[in-house]
Amino acid sequence: MAKIAILGCGYGTALGVLFSTYGHEVVTWTKFEQEAQLLRTEREHKRLLPGVKLPDSLGVTTDVHCVSGADFVVVAIPSPFFREAVQAVKPYIDKKSVVINVSKGLEASTGYRLSQIITEELPENPVGVITGPCHAEEIARLVPTTEVCSGYQDGIAEYIQRTLSNERYRIYVNDDVPGCELGGVLKNPIALGCGIARGMGLGDNTVAALMTRGMTEITRLGVALGANWKTFTGMAGIGDLIVTCTSLHSRNFRAGNLIGKGTPAAEAVAQVGTVEGYTSSKIAYKLAQERGIDTPIIEQIVKICYEGSDPKASISALMTRETRHEREIFWTD
């Protein structure tokens, strides 16, 4: 069994429940003493995971020393605060600790994938990524879930898989770190768009179109950013896209739904909480423009979220684009 420190008490709490249930020594960290105290005394995350009792063995702390001696340091922090959290614990992480990103965002100032922040801040540590189709609400309730992991160093993904897999949590391995991470990032703006469509009262046809053509955009941009197109046919791609675009558990979908019903985008995000698709849409569109990559759906999400575009006008703009062939080549291998 492993010693695991998890940074973040949102999704991190769900992972903490899972890993401690299956015998690992787990502590979750938050910088907010009030949050830590509530979790310690109530043994329940009533806002995010109502009805899920935290195992007695699951620790909660605000002490950055909690990472010392950990086999795994799992970073489950929203992208705007990701680097800050890594820097906070940086002096106390052992060089042998495997540091794993499980968050799905991009850094606004650099456009970095979040694992790139880890490798920059902790260049001597082995680094991995776990991603795929999952909701915190279901992870915490031990609903059978499959994800995929990838690592920067040889054997790290296999070590993660071997140590953290269990009868309720199956981990696959993929050698494409950029693809695994970008699949989890780029599906978020598409899920926001699917939520908008549902909020507008549009049907299954529209959502299917957004998901399918959204995957085309994910693959185009992902390949341009160093990913292998094949990764997007698996857990990190189509798997995560499906779960995020079709479920009310998805904060991206819920925020989009509010926007589609007329709530201003910033207000919808404030109501829902962390909505990575809102932030990453703008970063992704900038990366696409810099590389000459066509991403019309992401472009319209940016227009709706940041320029006040009417979603009806965005749907019309997408539907009346110049006609084209469906198939295209994303790769050279």
Image (spheres, rainbow, N blue to C red):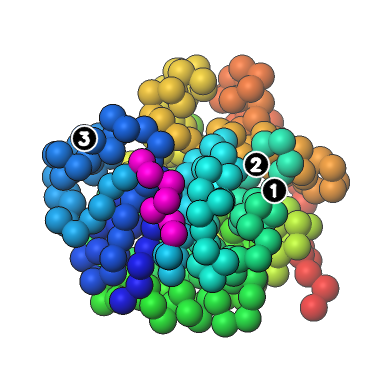
> Where is residue 41 drawn, in percent x and y?
15, 39
In magenta, the rendered stretch is 62-68
Q: CA distance from mark 3 to mark 2?
A: 30 Å
Q: For label 3, count other residues whose C-alpha is less than 10 Å away and answer few (under 14), some (14-19) or many (20+).
A: some
Q: Residue sitting at 28 percent across and 30 percent down?
A: 34
Q: CA distance from mark 3 to mark 1?
A: 33 Å
The reply to whether dot 1 and dot 2 touch (C-beta < 8 Å) is yes
Q: Which label sits on residue 112?
A: 1
Which amino acid, by three-letter code, is at mark 1? Tyr
Q: Which residue is mark 2?
A: 107
Which amino acid, by three-letter code, is at mark 2? Glu
In the image, which is nearer the foreground, mark 3 or mark 1?
3
Q: Is residue 263 visible to the viewer in this orientation of the structure?
A: yes
> Where is residue 177 drawn, in percent x and y?
63, 66
Task: Say what secondary structure mark 2 lies in.
Answer: loop
Which amino acid, by three-letter code, is at mark 3? Leu
Q: Earlier in the sequence, mark 1 or mark 2?
A: 2
Is residue 149 located in the magenta-colored stretch of the structure? Answer: no
